[in-house]
Image (cartoon, rainbow, N blue to C red):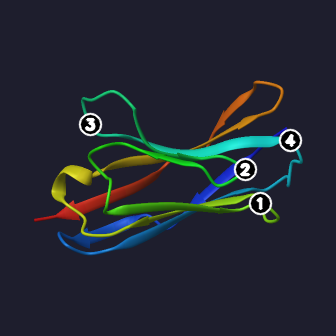
Amino acid sequence: QVQLVESGGGLVQAGGSLRLSCADSRNSFNINVMGWYRQAPGKQRELVATITTGGNTNYADSVKGRFTISRDNAKKTVYLQLNSLKPEDTAVYYCYADTFWGNAYWGQGTQVTVSS
């Protein structure tokens, strides 16, 4: 069973950068897609970016050109580099992973706060 542990959130000024990390602490062998979603207060959870085992990526339009997703398959870890941050990027960021068997897993969430 997959267990996702996130790190790297925090408070940053607008225009700044952060790097989020998420690792499967159980080093599962059957992880397929990994990614990040976010949820701002009063809003629904939304896709930020995903990446397949082969490295194919998908980004929300709002973060294209500013955020970069990457992964280390050997370490079962996914990263999200957040650059040129805006106040509207403030949210709880959740790591996501699904398996080749069709199961989906979520991390506990990490807060990203961007001050203007």
Q: Are the residues flagged by discs 2 and 1 in contact, CB closer than 8 Å?
A: yes
Sequence-first tag of 4 and 1: 4
Identify which amino acid the numbered label 4 is placed on.
Answer: Asn
Q: Are the residues flagged by discs 4 and 1 in contact, CB closer than 8 Å?
A: no
Toward which corner of the image does residue 73 lie, by quadrant?
A: bottom right
Q: Is residue 80 visible?
A: yes
How many residues crowd mark 4 within 10 Å: few (<14), some (14–19), many (20+)?
some
Is 25 situated left or right of 35 in this image? right
Identify which amino acid the numbered label 3 is placed on.
Answer: Pro
* Mark whose residue sits in front, 1 or 3: 1
Q: CA distance from mark 3 to mark 4?
A: 33 Å
> Dot 4: what SS?
loop
* Mark whose residue sits in front, 4 or 2: 2
Identify the mark at residue 53; answer none if there is no mark. Answer: 2
Q: Residue under circle 4?
A: 30
Residue drawn 85% across the image and 55% down it: 27
> Dot 3: what SS?
loop
